[in-house]
Image: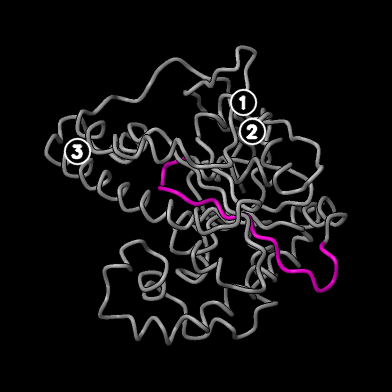
Amino acid sequence: MSEVLAVGERTAAGDPPAGERLRVVYVMGAGHSGSTILGVALGNCAGCFYAGEVDEWLLKGSGRWAGEERTRFWEAVRGELGDVEQGLRGEAVNRLIERSSAIFRLGERRQRGRVLPRYRRATESLFAAIANVAGASYVIDTSHFPLRARQLQRIAGIELHLVFLVRDPQSVVESNVRELSPHEVAERRVRALGTNLGLWLTQLLSIYVFLRQPRARRMFLRYEDLVADPQGVLRQLLDHLGLDAPLPDTSALAVGVPLEGNRLLAAETISIKAPRSERARSSRLTTVLQRPWQLPLALLRPAARARSASGSTSRSGSTSRSGRAG
């Protein structure tokens, strides 16, 4: 049986009643914070469909990953949309509306105002098409941009559920510089500084958007809590969504057919492993620059927490993947 058909059969029992608003779970936060892992895990829960980084649809019209089932699913979505996206494709709309740097483009406010009504209609239509093809009650979007979340808050036809996901900034910075050789000292320093500045802007906007979201439809989550106690954290998230779905086996999570995300999506299945003891390389620059966010983030509520026998929270963990997508 095809993956597309399997998705529809798995979630059909959770179809929303006619006339009910679209339910979108949006994972917001910095890149390299584990949003793909969280999205895959939620997508393995009955009633949920993991669509990946949906912003890529208007940006490129397709995702990075191929495969027969993935292509079939997204072609079916395209067939339902018609011409609602006309004039919105490409980097310009993403840069104008969704990227955090858009707040600095004050000279483009009029252009943004002209585009926004069409952008919102196209975004709502896209989510409706995804939900219909998948037969899902909840569509999971891990595009992570806080300004995209702000626009979703303003679309009347969408019932938005917001997850603000953060990760140890040392791990985020290390993930961004990992591809550079240790011998490229100057390049690593420049990228580390740029990542820290980007984190500052993302945290600021994310907290603003998070606090403007109704408490009943928002949740703060640390990636370290997810990997320390995936079953417990997923249960808290599902309960907050009002879903009485059984928990998936986090040692064998089916990736499904998401549009875009990190390279984990090249696998057929991924697993969330038990915590490991090693930590990311520590950077004094990152420690100093990110320290001001520790208290504001600690105060955000409601929050999903890892639960252990001692009541403490573990702060380390990892994932693995197996198999390759077609």
- In the image, is 89 to the left or to the right of 129? left
- In the image, is 311 to the left or to the right of 240? left
The colour scheme of the drawn protein is one colour
Which of disc 3 and disc 1 is earlier in sequence?
3
> Residues at badges 2 and 1 in contact (C-beta under 8 Å)?
yes
Discs 1/3, front: 1
Q: At 34% from the left edge and 40% from the top edge, which residue is drawn?
A: 293
- Residue corresponding to mark 3: 188
Which of disc 2 and disc 3 is earlier in sequence?
3
Query: Where residue 186 sits in the image (x, y, percent)?
Result: 11, 39
Residue in front for this viewpoint, 192 or 314: 314
Q: At 22% from the left edge and 44% from the top edge, which residue is drawn?
A: 191
Residue in front for this viewpoint, 221 or 84: 221
Q: At 79% from the left edge and 61% from the top edge, which residue is drawn?
A: 135
- Residue corresponding to mark 1: 229
Seen in the picture, residue 216 relative to 16 is either above or below; the reply is above
| Residue situated furthest top in the rendering | 310
Residue 253 shown in magenta: no
Residue 22 shown in magenta: yes
- In the image, is 258 to the left or to the right of 317? right
Seen in the picture, residue 38 relative to 68 is either above or below; the reply is above
Query: Where residue 78 sits in the image (x, y, percent)?
Result: 64, 74
Query: Where residue 114 sits in the image (x, y, percent)?
Result: 43, 87
- Residue corresponding to mark 2: 233
| Chain part drawn in magenta | 16-33
Callout 2, which amino acid? Val
> Residues at badges 1 and 3 in contact (C-beta under 8 Å)?
no
Callout 1, which amino acid? Asp
> Callout 1 environment at 10 Å: few (<14), some (14 to 19), or many (20+)?
many
Which image quadrant is residue 108 in? Answer: bottom left
Label for residue 322?
none
Element type where label 2 sits in the image: helix
